[in-house]
Amino acid sequence: MAKAIKQIEESKVTSQEKQSEDLFAIIKLVSENREAITTSMEILGELKQTGVLDMFKGALRTREKIGAIALEQINQPSMHNTIKNAFNIIEFLGSINPDQMKVLLSALRKGMDEFSESVEKNEHIGIWGMMRSIRDPKVNTVITSMLGFLNGVGQEVDKGPNA
């Protein structure tokens, strides 16, 4: 018959064994993520080559000074207005129907093209030319739209700043 176990020995992991396990875990992670690591290294190489990495390194070294300058600039009264205006612009853009914005931006782009052409040609138009233009259905549509726009602006202006 076997003898009864009276003493249990704990197996202690030595620091060298722990270091070996950690190193194996790192090597395993590297092999599993080889493509991501390679891509990251290529990106870092490009950043180094263009000088961006050195800029980041310098910014990190002087982060206290940069932070102090940034806070000083943010505490300027004009910056408070800028921040409030930015929030108002974001709120305004969020309230616009994307389909309407697409049509408007497309029309603005086309209008800018036409504007550039007339500037290049150095065209001048007289009163009679303007009157003929007003009869053009495209011009008439824009004038009607602009009058609607002006009407809407006028309604909001009449409400006052506290509306």
Image: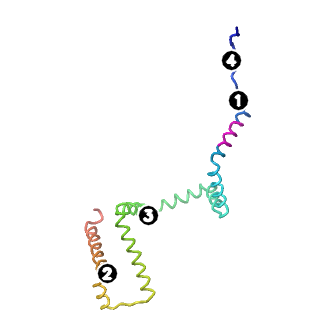
Please name the residue that numbered disc 3 is placed on.
Answer: 82
Q: Is 70 left, or right, of 19 in this rendering?
A: left
Please name the residue that numbered disc 2 is placed on.
Answer: 139
Q: Earlier in the sequence, mark 2 or mark 3?
A: 3
Badge 3 density bin: few <14, some 14–19, many ≥20, Cα 10 Å: few
Q: Earlier in the sequence, mark 1 or mark 3?
A: 1
Q: Earlier in the sequence, mark 2 or mark 4?
A: 4
- Between disc 1 and disc 3, the foreground one is 1
Q: Is 144 left, or right, of 40 in this rendering?
A: left
Please name the residue that numbered disc 1 is placed on.
Answer: 13
> In the displayed structure, would residue 67 be above or below residue 124?
above
The secondary structure type at the circle numbered 4 is loop
As measured in the structure, the alpha-carbon distance from the residue carrying label 2 to the one carrying label 4 is 97 Å
Asked whether residue 119 is drawn in magenta, I would say no
**Place of residue 3 in the rendered image (x, y in percent of width and height, measured from the top left):** 70, 10
**Place of residue 56 in the rendered image (x, y in percent of width and height, measured from the top left):** 62, 58
As measured in the structure, the alpha-carbon distance from the residue carrying label 2 to the one carrying label 3 is 36 Å
- Quadrant housing the C terminus: bottom left
Asked whether residue 20 is drawn in magenta, I would say yes
Tell me, for residue 129, which label it has, or none.
none
Q: Earlier in the sequence, mark 1 or mark 4?
A: 4
As measured in the structure, the alpha-carbon distance from the residue carrying label 1 to the one carrying label 4 is 16 Å
Q: Nearer the viewer, residue 77 or 34?
A: 34
- Between disc 2 and disc 1, the foreground one is 2
Badge 4 density bin: few <14, some 14–19, many ≥20, Cα 10 Å: few
